[in-house]
Amino acid sequence: MSGRSKRKSTEPASAKSVPQAVVSRLSYYLRELQHLLRQGVQTISSSQLGQRLGFTDAQVRKDLAYFGQFGYPGIGYRCQELAEAIRRILGTDQQWAVALVGVGHLGQALLGYKGFTQQGFVFHAAFDVNPRVIGKQIEGIPIYSLDRLPEVIRSHKIRLGIIAVPASAAQGVADRLVEAGIQGILNFAPVTITVPPQVSLVGVDLAMELEQLSFSVLHRQQDAGK
Amino acid sequence: MSGRSKRKSTEPASAKSVPQAVVSRLSYYLRELQHLLRQGVQTISSSQLGQRLGFTDAQVRKDLAYFGQFGYPGIGYRCQELAEAIRRILGTDQQWAVALVGVGHLGQALLGYKGFTQQGFVFHAAFDVNPRVIGKQIEGIPIYSLDRLPEVIRSHKIRLGIIAVPASAAQGVADRLVEAGIQGILNFAPVTITVPPQVSLVGVDLAMELEQLSFSVLHRQQDAGK
């Protein structure tokens, strides 16, 4: 609310100094801007953008200030320009070669997930230990034996790996991906894994989505009962 | 930063006035508090909690102020007490009966997802149109014909529905769930669906998780190249 407390930043911050929650909010800003653009909205203020997402205007400005100056005095943000800037920051303005490890039910669902391709994430290979799937293709993606992981990762210049194996196998797979030179891992296995500091790691917690839902149902009911 | 701009709230806000992003942050606060408790940490200040998640202390206090007063002067928050309060607010201190619609790959993966049960979300039934799975059990959950949805939802007092069907079928399934009296829907289908205002709806966007990863990889590399 007060402009005085706003932290000024003239240079983009280095990756280590940007908290993960800020990056998560960038995805929300991007989705909202894409939604606004589809509605024909050209410009938006930090307080309007924040209001739509439940952030303070100071939080919006602070988040974006990590990466540069995007607002125009008296105008706010230009939606198209800010959306493109956020895509550059998130890296979704380029294509990412992705490998999947674990072609069980979750893995097969992920291979067919349209949302990944839309944002520039393209599967090049999948790996499993099950001889019944090795050598086949799913959604056009070849399934290799896990033993061939280092070779395939390197030859296809794959940068990101998705782990969709049982919890007990997840750390072993992460170690193999790291050895093969992968740069980032998205872990769907419900277990905490560790990777060396030069490798990025994001864990997925689907229960958080259900928590949002139970909250909404619970408080809606309480309101209705008043 | 300034205590003066803090919005004071003595009564819990109604559901409609709490933005979804605030509820999302509650899940993050809860995970962080559970992590701190496992490390034996008893109390934490709003600025420490915010710092660990990349929020301002004002944002933390504002978020929690929607639901009451949780801090103690000179102490901060008591981790155990705040974690329990957030579980009550999110509704994960109680059990929720959940139905799944769509027993394809994603559906079968969700039926086996341990994280749901840990937070109190328990599958009671699953539905599909495929005669090869109807009448069977997966992970101990009975699979019913979609035609029996209203009857089973009512007899099992199921409150939440998860949609894991192809995009083209998602709105039709949502309509059936609403008619059967479901209170909330978690939609994994990559399409926007609409429900009446008395029903809660949360959409899952798995690409957001990959965006966090590409950001991290990209900026780590840029740092390394400096």
Image (cartoon, coloured by chain):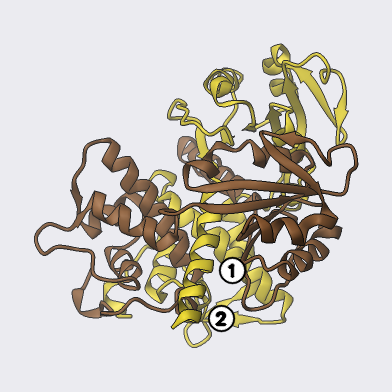
Chain colours: A brown, B yellow
Q: Quadrant of the N terminus of chain A?
A: bottom left
* Circle 2: residue type: Ile
Q: Residue furthest front?
A: A155
| Residue drawn at x 23%, y 64% as measured from the top left | A70
Residue B130 in the image: state x and y as whole percent. 76, 16
In front: A59, or A140? A140
| Residue drawn at x 90%, y 42% as measured from the top left | A131
User: Helix or strand or loop: what does disc 2 sit on?
Assistant: strand
| Residue drawn at x 64%, y 78% as measured from the top left | A197
In front: A42, or A131? A131
In front: A94, or A118? A94
User: Helix or strand or loop: what does disc 1 sit on?
Assistant: helix
* Circle 1: residue type: Leu
Q: Which mark identifies residue B82?
A: 1
Given the image, what chain letter belongs to the residue carrying mark 2? B
- Look at mark 2 in the image and give the residue it sits on: B44
Residue B50 in the image: state x and y as whole percent. 48, 75
Residue B178 in the image: state x and y as whole percent. 55, 22
Task: Give the CA separation, mark 1 to mark 2.
Answer: 10 Å
The answer, for residue A10, to whether it is visible in the render is yes
